[in-house]
Image (spheres, helix red, strand yellow):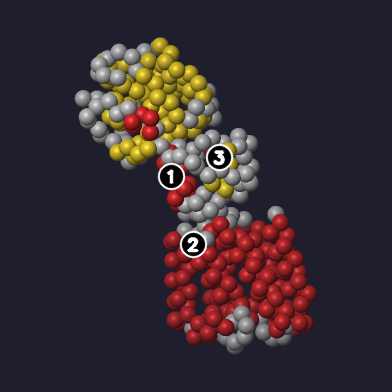
């Protein structure tokens, strides 16, 4: 019986190279927790050390580390077994009995896992073949800090991104990359591009629930939702205030999801300027908030389902709305042109 002192569980699946699986090696214990040192997965910017005690019987046993970042040194009872820099390594342990395993790194960490492998009939871990043929790309449009290289939460909420990594991510992350059609760009000096997280499900539900309540309670809002961008309808002050509050809340959520709060402040300024000018020149200030109801609703759907296109969708709807206002109100075409100009500036930043 193989045992590990203070053994813990990190991931439900261990990904092994096909060569080890073909030799009959199986996972019999995990060393990702217990002992002294950080809990795996982890990334450290300074030298680090893990100390584990394991029981090794007479049969061959391998110490298998996957998702390694940086240079690694492995000691068994103060004897150096292996030193080098690789993403995955299988090291034979010597002798039987209880041994002290010390793993040291200069900078980096282990963002996958550490396991004991043996040619045994006893298997306590679900095993999958290490994934192959990960997609690579050249121009990343998103990046993750080293502390998040081993996480898959962001990957599961996005699709189709070129993500910059400073090291090859662990197997479970590679599986998530393929599942969500991501590719990676390996660069030690990856640009700090804020990732587009998209709208969370709770934010999306909150926006649509509040919009449904407004549409149910105020017929003017319900009618303006589908026709307001083309045909302004008369509405009261309460409908205007509640709609403006919903629209600004939606744009704020979208700005946080991109993330770029500059968009929110630019939008707020233009919304205020438009309200004043449209009311003073045409007496149609209500058209300003009515024309934003449908675009913000569409943006919330894009932010949930296709977050990688959220910014482009925002700019596109802003331009479409500006063109619609020019066709209806040629007197304020200059204002709409200014909106389109600022949209282009935002797109280029």
What secondary structure is found at the residue carrying circle 2? helix
The residue depicted at 45 percent of the width and 39 percent of the height is 132
Residue 190 % position (x, y): 62, 39
Mark 1, residues whose alpha carbon is within 10 Å: few (<14), some, or many (≥20)?
some
Return the mark for residue 165. Answer: 3
Q: CA distance from mark 1 to mark 3?
A: 15 Å
Q: Residue at x 68, y 70 (%)?
A: 319
> Looking at the rendering, which quadrant does residue 186 occupy?
top right
**Few, some or many C-alpha atoms within 10 Å of disc 3 (few <14, some 14-19, many ≥20)?**
many
- Residue 60: percent from the left, percent from the top? 30, 19
Q: Residues within 10 Å of mark 2 (few under 14, many from 20)?
A: some
Q: Pick the residue in front: 92 or 111.
A: 92
Q: Is residue 226 left or right of residue 323?
A: left
User: Alpha-carbon distance for marks 2 and 1?
Assistant: 20 Å
Element type where label 3 sits in the image:
strand
Mark nearer the viewer, 2 or 1: 1
Tag 1–tag 3 contact (CB < 8 Å): no
Residue drawn at point x = 57 percent, y = 48 percent: 162
Residue 317 position, x and y percent, is 63, 70
In primary-sequence order, the first of circles 1 and 3 is 3
**In the picture, residue 129 is in which quadrant?**
top left
Q: Nearer the viewer, residue 134 or 304?
A: 134
Q: Residue beneath label 2, please?
A: 305
Q: Upstream in the sequence, badge 3 or badge 2?
A: 3
Q: Point out the image quarter for the N terminus.
A: top left
Above or below residue 202? Residue 331 is: below
């Amino acid at each position: 019986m193989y045992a590990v002192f203070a053994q813990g569980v990190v991931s439900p699946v261990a990904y092994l190279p096909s060569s080890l699986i073909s030799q009959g090696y199986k996972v019999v214990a995990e060393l990702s927790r217990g002992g002294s040192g950080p809990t795996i997965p982890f990334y450290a910017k300074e030298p680090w050390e893990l100390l584990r005690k394991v029981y090794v019987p007479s049969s061959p046993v391998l110490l298998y580390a996957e998702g390694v970042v940086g240079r690694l040194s492995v000691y068994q009872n103060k004897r150096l077994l292996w030193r080098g820099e690789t993403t995955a390594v299988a090291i034979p342990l010597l002798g039987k009995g209880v041994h002290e395993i010390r793993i040291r790194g200069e900078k980096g960490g282990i963002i996958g896992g550490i396991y004991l492998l043996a040619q045994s009939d006893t298997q306590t871990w679900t095993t999958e073949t290490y994934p192959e043929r990960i997609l690579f790309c050249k121009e990343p449009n998103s990046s993750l800090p080293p502390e998040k290289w081993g996480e898959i939460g962001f990957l599961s909420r996005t699709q189709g991104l070129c993500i910059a990594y400073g090291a090859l991510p662990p197997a479970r992350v590679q599986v998530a990359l393929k599942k969500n059609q991501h590719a990676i760009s390996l660069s030690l000096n990856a640009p700090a591009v804020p990732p587009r997280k998209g709208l969370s499900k709770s934010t999306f539900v909150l926006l649509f629930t509040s919009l449904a309540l407004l549409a149910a309670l105020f017929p003017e809002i319900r009618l303006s939702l589908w026709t307001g961008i083309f045909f302004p309808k008369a509405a009261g002050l309460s409908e205007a205030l509640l709609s403006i509050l919903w629209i600004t809340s939606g744009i704020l959520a979208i700005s946080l999801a991109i993330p770029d709060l500059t968009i929110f402040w630019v939008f707020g300024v233009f919304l205020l300027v438009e309200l004043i000018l449209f009311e003073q020149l045409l007496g149609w200030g209500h058209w300003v908030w009515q024309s934003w109801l449908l675009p913000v609703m569409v943006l919330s759907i894009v932010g949930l389902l296709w977050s990688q296109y959220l910014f482009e969708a925002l700019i596109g709807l802003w331009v479409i709305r500006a063109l619609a206002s020019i066709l209806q109100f040629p007197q304020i075409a200059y204002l709409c042109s200014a909106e389109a100009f600022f949209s282009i500036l935002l797109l280029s930043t």
